[in-house]
Every structure is written in C-alpha cells, then in structure tokens.
Image (cartoon, helix red, strand yellow):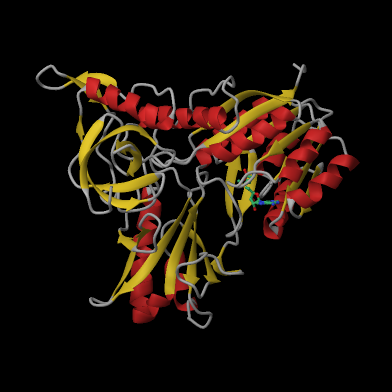
Amino acid sequence: MRAGERHLATAVRLNDDGEGIAYIDGLTVFVPGLLPGEQAWVEVTQVARRYGRARLVSAPEPVPTTAARQDAAEGAQYEGRRGPAAATVATDGNGYAMADTGRVLPKCAVFGACGGCQLQHLAYPRQLEHKRRVVEAALRRIGRLADVPVAPVLGMDNPWRYRNQIQVPLRWTDPPGRLTAGFFAMGSHELVPTEACHLASAAMEQTVRAVVRVLADALGPAAADVHHLIVRESYTTGEQMVVLVAARQDLDLRQVVDDLLALPRVVSVCRTVQPYRTGPVWGPTVEVLGGKAALTERIEGLEFLISPRSFFQVNTAQARVLYAQVVQAAALQPTDVVLDAYCGTGTIALVLARQARKVVGVEQVPAAVADARRNAAHNGIAHAVFLTGAVERILPRLCTQEHFDVVVLDPPRKGCAPQVLAAVVAARPRRIIYVSCNPATLARDLRVLADGGFVVRRVQPVDMFPQTSHIECCALLDLSGAS
Ligand SMILES: C[S@@+](CC[C@H](N)C(=O)[O-])C[C@H]1O[C@@H](n2cnc3c(N)ncnc32)[C@H](O)[C@@H]1O
C-alpha cells in the first residue's frame, strides 16, 4: 500500500482516539470519521511499518451486517484478538440487515477540521459504551486485569456546553484586515476559523465574539499581537474571566479593559505575555488588568477561588460527579489521615477533609499550592496541609514519616513515577483511590499496585469530556483480604 492510493475500507471498531480502524491488505489503517460497520472510499495519507492512516473521500455508508461481522473477524485475526462483532443490526429501507452504526449529524459546522472533538458523529450512548470498552481493553491488555469490573460510564444528561474554560487562537488575516478567532486543526497550528463551540456556553461564545470586536476596534492591526484569548466561566455564578495572551509586553491593553469589563458576564480581565504563538499558551506570569483576581466556584458545599492559572476540572458538573465517586470510594472514618497526591488547588483534599482527621496535599506548581491553602482558609478548614514539590521527590520520605489510611492519586496523563507507586505500596494504606485521565497509564500503574498486594475492586469511568475521545476514571483499590 502506498500514500495516495484509494481503497474501499470498512471500519470494524474505533481506536482509543475515536478513529475508525479498517484493515487494508492486512495492514491496520486508521480513518478519522469512519464508524464501525461503515464503508467508504478512503485515500491513504501515511504508511508506517505497522499501521497506515487514510482520509475519507466518500460519504460513509452502513454495510450489511454479515460483511461487517466478517471484517471484524478478519481484523481480529490480523491483530491476534478474539474480536467481537463490529455492529448491531438495523434494516435499510428494503428490509436488508444493515449495520446500526450509531451515526448522528455532528452539531458543529467545523467538526472533522477542528481538533477539539473526535466523536460528535457518534450517538452519545454509543460514545459512553465505546469509552467503557477502551477502559476494559486497557485493563486487560496493559494491566492484565481482565477480571476488574468496569462500571458503565457516568454520562451527562446534556453532553454539550459543559466546558468552563476555552482557549481560542486569534489570527490577523490580511487581506481583508480582520482579527479572526477559531480553533487549531488536529495536530497542527493551522487555524480553523469559527466563533462557535458547542462545548462552551452560549455566554462564552458571545464573549469571544465581543472581545474580538473590542480588540479589533481599539487596536486595529496591532490586535495581531494578541494571539490567544482564554475565557473561564464559573458554573456556579456565571461570572467570566478573560485572559488576553499578548506576543509583547509593550502592547497597550489597558485601553480595552473598561470595554471588556462592560461585557455582560466579564468580571476579570488579565494579561499574560507569551512571545511564541504556537508553543505553550501561558507566559511565565499573569497580570490582572482590571476587575476581580479570581472566579468563585462551588462544589460539594465548598467554595473555591480560582485564579487565572489554577487547574480546575474543565467540566464542573461532572467534576461534582467524579468527586462524589472519590468520597464514596474513600469511605473515610473520622480518625483517618488522607494523602492527596497531585492535588492541584486542593479540591479533592478539601472535599475529603470534612470526613477525615487530617489531609495532606502534594503538588508541584507553587501557585496551585497557594490557591489550595487559600481555599482551605476560605472554607475554614484548618486540618489540611499542602506541600510544594514533585510527588516522586516528596512521597518516599513522607510515607515513612506519617501513616496514611487513604491515598488519592490524581496524576497527569503520564501517570505515576515508579518511586511514587513503590512508596504507596510500602505505606500500606487501607485504600487507594486512583483518579486518571489516561486509561493506558492507569492500567499500567494498577498492575504495579496489584503486584504490591492491593486488590483493584472496581473502575468507574466518568464522562468528563463528552464528544471527545478523552476518558476520566476513578479506580478503587484496597489491601488484599481487607473488606
Ligand atoms: C490531573 S491534575 C489533578 C488536580 C486535582 N486533583 C483536581 O482534581 O483538581 C494533576 C496535577 O498534578 C500536578 N503535577 C503534575 N506532575 C506532578 C509531579 N511530578 N509532582 C507533583 N504534582 C504534579 C499538576 O500540576 C496538576 O495540578
């Protein structure tokens, strides 16, 4: 197979990124936009040693189920898997049994071009089932944990407009001399122009449009030096924070502050300076140009102040669901001492603090630790301690100095460093709750903890990121033999 060739491809399942998997000439080929049980003409865009990539060149059509099942079985052979049939059955207008692929019309006009969403074309219940299977497969293949029950994914009643933060790249397009908002295409810094995002609230969309207008009117072509706009919104109060990302420090943004603060929801205007337009968006510092220094959010009866750089789960409604799972899994007793490793701004630690004797949070970003301490004080919680530093550096010693009854791990996508897992295993807490946004590293780390004598009782996925392929999970482990 060569790049540029065209083939008729049938997808047999989705990969972890939500792309269709087809088998062409015995090679696994990833086709974004093709669903299991669908067939389409595709053009090969890349051929590597073990896989290829292709793009759709015709509209996908459901295939007769017998063909879909046959392809699934063949595909399973290529991969040495025992594969399930790809599709359930529906009938076409003539009564033929066709694959029921779950295809729906994407809401967004730029779906497929914008890199933000991968699953808008799949009915939401199917998205949830797909995510549950991804978690199960990771546990089985990577963690050798085939017996661990994976509960149905906890989804949203309305899986749209859930984000409390969006980052919008801005570009000056000349001609016609206009500031244009959009999102980056998948895996590139190419702007896909749009001022709409169905994952953000309608009020955030309005703010994006208004900020672009204000910047263009006030700055003219100099607005080209504002290359990103970040809007954060409190789910609880509806208040918004606008962060302007400028390419240079001497760009005079003070002239737009009053106009921005006059927008209906905007209570805070900030600036960060980042000379590079295509690297990390945030500069080293953030300055509040006008209005409040932080938004307020409420979760589990606690109030959290969120400053511009603070990590906060992007989906507040589902963060509440996730934290309720953590509370339930922790099953705390009033005498318990809890460790919250990778604690961010201390949300989990503070939610658990009400039922524990003491909580200790560890986080490497000093600003996040400052927020965690401030949030503890704001909520009158005196028995929460927050330590600044890398978990892998702090934990090995900390765990020999203090006994933790319950340990919460909520690492970034790369998972926990081996010395963190070793320290937790040696500490023998009664329970471990592992919160993860990456099923592959979750499975890898659960294997280590299981080999260290902990039993993985259950894994509960929570759909924090509907319409995308991202998956959040909460796993519960306890000591072998303990109840
Ligand atoms: C997924 S977030 C979890 C935040 C928090 N538990 C919450 O729910 O809001 C992961 C956090 O780990 C922090 N982090 C990443 N690597 C770290 C490390 N090696 N040591 C300490 N903290 C780390 C990040 O700064 C981030 O705040």
Residue 437 on image: x %, y %: 55, 41
Furthest toward the bottom, the residue is 250
Q: Is residue 166 above or below residue 190?
A: above
Which residue is at a point 56% across and 69% down the rendered structure image? 283
In the image, 148 versus 113, the foreground residue is 148
Give percent across and percent down for residue 478: 73, 24
Q: Is residue 77 left or right of residue 245?
A: left
- Up-down relation of residue 132 to residue 3 (above or below): above
Residue in view at x 34 percent, y 63 percent: 191
For residue 270, side relative to residue 394 (left or right) = left
Residue 157 is at least partly visible in this image: no
Look at 29% across and 22% down and name the residue there.
Answer: 69
Image point (42%, 42%), residue name = 17
227 over 391 or under it: above or below: below
Left or right side of 470 for 14: left
Q: Position of residue 27 (x, y in %)?
A: 34, 40
Q: Spot the residue most to the right.
A: 401
Say which quarter of the image contains residue 360: top right
Q: Name the quadrant containing residue 170.
A: bottom left
Q: Quadrant of the C terminus?
A: top right
Report the front residue among 481 and 41.
Answer: 41
Using the image as rendered, state which of residue 421 and residue 70 is in the foreground: 70
Q: Image check: 430 left or right of 316?
A: right
Percent position of residue 403, x then y = 86, 35
